[in-house]
Amino acid sequence: MGHQSTFSEDLQAARKLAAAANEAMSKHGIAPTPANYCVWYAYVGRSIAGLTRDIDERLALQKGFGWQVNQELFERYFGNDAETLTIRRSGAELHDTMGRMLKRLDVAGQDVSAFGETLVEANGSLASVASVEAGVQAVVKRLSGATSDMVRKNRDLEQELRLSTAQITTLQERLDQARREAFTDALTGIGNRRCFDLALTETCERAILGEVELCLLLLDIDHFKRFNDTYGHRIGDQVLKIVGAKLRQMSRDIDTPARYGGEEFALLLVDAPLDAALKRADQLREAMASNYLRNVASGDVYGQITVSVGVSRFRATDTVESFVSRADAALYQAKSDGRNRVVAEAA
């Protein structure tokens, strides 16, 4: 009775949220597609902090919600990553459950085998006693046969479960690989823009709660267009690979290095105050400047690889956008001041 009452209350609440979601989408001219409905149902229910903040900010700035905006919101909070994570967790739970079942079957199989052996021995003993009636021997023989059949079926089931467990393990590995590929820039091997955006949202939420100190480095390869125009895209790609490799090499496990877009890169530093972030930025700049792109076959030197870097620190009053905007403004200042330099955010 109690379960029925709870269900009715949940159903009533769900109906109210559904009506509110429909009203909000209608108000902002949003098509009632399944993806859009998913976003706005979660928004009116205030169930996802990041999503609520993103939509509230757009509403405050009186920005519209075109198809692309809604698609980005859906992919960020409900897209393939969330689905993959759910499948991966479910697969892990199922894998653990089957592992426990196999252990129990091992024990059960041993018990059944021991029981069968005991019956066989008993049957042999009874057969040697002339005074035992034939009916008793027949019963024991039937029990012995049934036990042998049980042992065989138990072993078949155990083999089938082991095969299923192996298949689930393979599926998990494939899902993990797909997830890594979905968040990795194919050319440079570091995180892509999607990886950066998700890490940025998560770490900013932690910074708002005061759990971490957060800084952002935005890097731009100086005169990258010149490499492409003078030597071709193949050389330009090599430059991008070198910068990506150096960024990965000089990052900690808790940092997020990513290709931000084109020739721009980003490094999200967790638990790093501004002075430490500026020091890291200058170390990166110097490490990049030590690279001269050469043609191994001909010995030709294509040029020095340098970067300009803008650095910002997350403040208590920040949004994701303002945090990134200050780093971007600092990067622009570094390029305006002559490139191959680090500039901190304006005070």
Image (cartoon, rainbow, N blue to C red):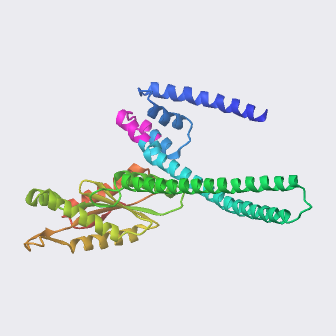
The single residue placed furthest to the right in the displayed view is: 131
The residue nearer to you, when weighing 237 against 310, is 237
* Residue 60: image location, x then y, percent: 44, 38
Placement of 40 over or under 264, stated as above or below:
above
| Residue at screen point 75% across, 61% down | 116
Q: Which is more toward the observer, 165 or 151?
A: 151
Q: Which secondary structure type mostly characterizes the magenta part of the structure?
A: helix
Q: Position of residue 68 (x, y in %)?
A: 35, 36
Residue 92 relative to residue 276: left or right: right
- Nearest the viewer among 223 and 228 is 228
Question: Is residue 65 part of the magenta span, yes or no?
Answer: yes
Q: Position of residue 101 (x, y in %)?
A: 65, 56
- Residue 112 sits inside the magenta stretch: no
Between 278 and 136, the residue placed more toward the observer is: 136
**Where, quadrant-wise, is the N terminus in this rendering?**
top right
* Position of residue 131 measured from the top left corner of the image (x, y, whole percent): 92, 61
Q: Tell me where the magenta segment starts and ends, as one range.
A: 56-74
Q: Residue at x 31, y 61 (%)?
A: 189
**Height in image: 249 above or below 83?**
below
Quarter of the figure with the C terminus: bottom left
